Amino acid sequence: MVADTFREEYLNELGRNIEAMAFEQGFEVSAEVGPNGGVAGTVLHEPPRQSRRRKTLFASRERHVIEISDVSAKKFCSRLLGTTLDRVADVVTRATEALTDFFQTARAELGFLLGCVNLHERLRAADHPVCFPRPIPAGGTPSYDFRSLRDPAICLSARSSVEGNTIDGRGRLLTVVTGANSGGKSTFLRSLGIAQVMMQAGMFVVAEAFEADIRTGIFTYFRNQDDSSMTYGRLKEELVRMRDLTGRVDAGSMVLLNEPFASTSEQDATEILSPITQALVDVGVKVLVVTHLYDFAAARAEQQRPTDLFLRAQRRADGSRTFRLEPGAPELTAHAMDIYRKIFGPDSA
């Protein structure tokens, strides 16, 4: 592209023009006298390249020498040269900006591609699966389907093996994720959101296989860290953020909700979250929600909507986590006692 855009002939001509614009041999300007003695029809001619030519040129014309004390004549010449050179400066500025923008854009795009190459090499060196996804055109049936999907951030930082998830979500508009505490629910949500972004950026994804429909916007709702400068209470802060989010989405968007409205009671949170979720789904927004709200998840599961998918974090009989998700109905418990016993000892409760 650089070779086609800036051919050698173009660069040579550009170099000659730049050299000429040093005006080492002076200016050659023609103009007419305009109304009220003004300057009109100014033209900057190509500067003579040799002193001999310049002497010959001026020898054939009438010459006028402006005295240092002639203020009016000096002002007239200043206006004449200023008007002429302003036009040249505008052209040079536009050309310079075009060239600068071209190479700045090229630098940014090459930096992005180089980052992709470095990330790919890091992931492959750690033996994580990498594939090019299959994007599905927007506007059709909502879909996602992947095998051994992983969170690239955890893949880069973890010292042990990272588990992947295999989920068939074809035709699903709402996905509700429940299950054991510390079972990998939020990690799954991040991995899917990152994979969607990477796919729509033309990148590879960290999975053995991945396909999903294109979304016009990707929005996330994760809990904010405690902030002493907050002007609202926790629930009001959540409601304000949810209002801002729902005001920006459109029918083709994707929304990732992680533990929404955990700052209030389960009954109140369910009454708030249920109509918001339904409204988003009704207009075609793809929604994935990780929640501990059993009332919300169970009531939704009872409706048995064909576009709903329910996933549950796996838990072994001994209480250990596999960090994998599988299709499953919501459970009343999130097995928090497993974590309690791990911290305080197996006989503590």
Image (tube, grey):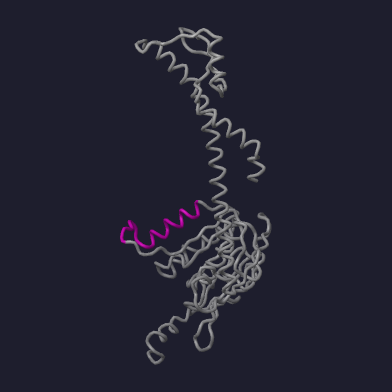
Q: Is residue 302 visible?
A: no
Q: Which segment did they paint magenta?
A: 228-247
x, y percentage for residue 271? 47, 64
Q: Could you tell me how many numbered marks the image carries?
A: 0
* Between 130 and 214, the one nearer to me in the picture: 130
Where, quadrant-wise, is the C terminus in this rendering? bottom left
Residue at the (32%, 56%) spot, across then down:
231
Vertical placement of residue 6 versus 143, above or below: above
Q: Residue furthest bottom?
A: 347
* Between 45 and 230, the one nearer to me in the picture: 45
x, y percentage for residue 236? 38, 59
x, y percentage for residue 188? 54, 70
* Between 133 and 228, the one nearer to me in the picture: 133
Residue at the (61%, 67%) spot, across then down:
308
Instruction: Label the magenta part by its dominant secondary structure.
Output: helix
Reply yes or no: does residue 305 show up in magenta. Answer: no
Residue at the (50%, 89%) spot, across then down:
318
Residue at the (54%, 32%) spot, across then down:
18
Q: Residue furthest left?
A: 228
